[in-house]
Amino acid sequence: MKLFVLHFVLTIIVSVFSYDSSKYSGYKVYQVTPKSLYEAYILKEFEHDEHFDFWTEIRSINLPVDIMVSPLAQNNFEAIMKSANIDYFVNIDDVEASLQNEENTSGRSIVTRGSVTFSDFMRHDDINAYLEQLAQDYPQIVSIESIGISFEGRDLLLVRISSGGSNKPTIYVQAAIHAREWIAPPVALYIINQLVENPDNVNLYEDVDWVVIPVVNPDGYEYTHTTERFWRKTRSTGTICYGIDGNRNFDALWGTVGASSWQCDITYRGHKAFSEVETQAVRDYILEHKDDIKLFLDVHSFGRWLLYPYGYSDDEPDDVEELRTLGRLFNDAIHSVRGLNYTVLSFASGLYYASGTSVDWAKDIGIELAYTIELPSGGTGFDPPSSDIEPVVEETWEGFKAFHSYIVDKFVTN
Ligand SMILES: *[C@@H]1O[C@H](CO)[C@@H](O)[C@H](O)[C@H]1NC(C)=O
Ligand SMILES: *[C@@H]1O[C@H](CO)[C@@H](O)[C@H](O)[C@H]1NC(C)=O
Ligand SMILES: [Zn+2]
């Protein structure tokens, strides 16, 4: 108990300083592995403190958790870890320096307008230009639709790939509702690229439609490119802080567990469910097409998790066995590429909960097969070196093909 009181007091003291965290000079990333529930609960005390940014969640004991800690809170944090005898080490000594190293080596390529690259992280404008070009070049199979305009005025483009006809089983994929998860848009773009531009894959959209939104949160995504690399939320204005966590803003037991009501927190849920234009746009599209959508995928990073509902409760859905079975098929396909594995698990773990997630909402409105994908880490975690993009998108694509086979087997009647 003493520990919590100490932590609380020190938190108040350091909290007086700084909302500005646009620079990461002196920030460290600690990797901490709680060995008991007691240790996990001590760690959880830091979750809603703005000096602590949990890059991965506390899902289980004996699993490492990555936490970025501001310079002001590091002494306090280390003292508490030591006195509680919790294993930790400094994974990144200076986040700002590690970012600069990566920018040095990333060899920024210039994307020709309308083309795609998987050797660098594309800006939102370039992503949209590529989608527009595809719609022009392949009008028989590609259609794009702006499902809304982001808070700062960017087009929320959705791509539909279809061989024609209507009401076909549809695989829905969205990415980058969390701005800093840079590996997510390339994974979404690779699906589009492979379906449309690789003739070997024509059979993959014969009986199944694919719908992909590569960047759900373009304002946040651009902000991570221009200003603050580890921004997570949208960029709507609050009275003190910007943005809400899009993946706490859906109407799935909204505002209950594992979501903050404080606007400066990175898991801020918003002042009501669907407060954001971006989540509204996603909601409206999905509600209109929910009878066709057979598989809902929300792509995030990082940690190599495939998470099925629910995040808001320990209860398991009735069809949890099927969700696990299909999850294993996804993992088998991934494993066959480089020998790496995903952990297939319920979103809520007993230690970690989240309400207002898109995956729970999709499940609740009747889309049976719904997952959150946490892609692999790389670099410091959220920023794989650009040389990692290709291996990751190629590997993940095999997993998507396994999903596709299952959807064909289950929903396409010949
Ligand atoms: C690489 O980064 C270092 C600091 O980390 C900086 O001093 C140097 O100018 C950078 N080099 C290039 C080519 O940008
Ligand atoms: C990784 O996945 C493969 C394929 O499903 C499985 O055979 C293997 O046991 C898994 N490895 C671990 C460490 O879970
Ligand atoms: Zn995320």
Image (tube, grey):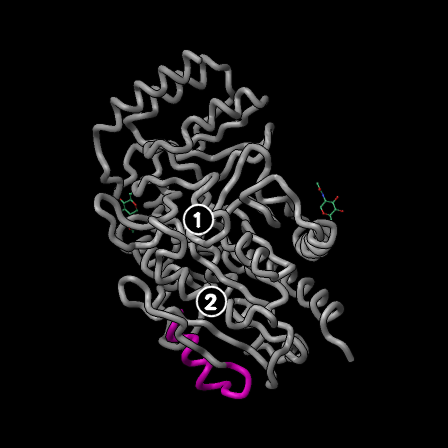
| Residue plotted at (58% across, 44% down) | 347
Quarter of the figure that contains the C terminus: bottom right
Q: Report x, y in % for residue 101.
A: 36, 45
Q: Residue furthest right?
A: 414
Judged left or right of residue 138, residue 245 is: left
Local SS, label 2: strand
Q: Check disc 1 and report its element: helix, strand or loop.
A: helix
Residue 68 part of the magenta segment: no
Where is mark 2, residue-wise? 213
Estimate how packed mark 2 is, as few (under 14), some (14 to 19) or many (20 or more) residues with alpha carbons within 10 Å: many
**Which label is found at residue 180?**
none
Label 1, label 2: how far apart the Cα atoms are: 18 Å
On the image, numbered disc 1 is attached to which residue? Answer: 248
Near-viewer residue (21 or 364): 364
**Residue 254 seen from this side:** yes
Viewer can see residue 391? no
Q: Establish if 391 lies above or below 289.
A: above
Residue 383 spot, x, y in % from top left:
43, 49
Q: Is residue 194 left or right of residue 125?
A: right
Q: Residue at x 56, y 66 (%)?
A: 172
Cβ atoms under marks 1 and 2 closer than 8 Å: no
Boundaries of the magenta span: 126-142
Quadrant containing the N terminus is top left
Q: Quadrant of residue 50?
A: top left
When asked about the image quadrant of residue 18, the answer is top left
For badge 2, the amino acid type reads Ile
**Mark nearer the N terminus (1 vs 2):** 2
Which residue is at the front of the view, 258 or 115? 258
Name the residue located 57 percent from the left edge and 23 percent from the top edge: 37
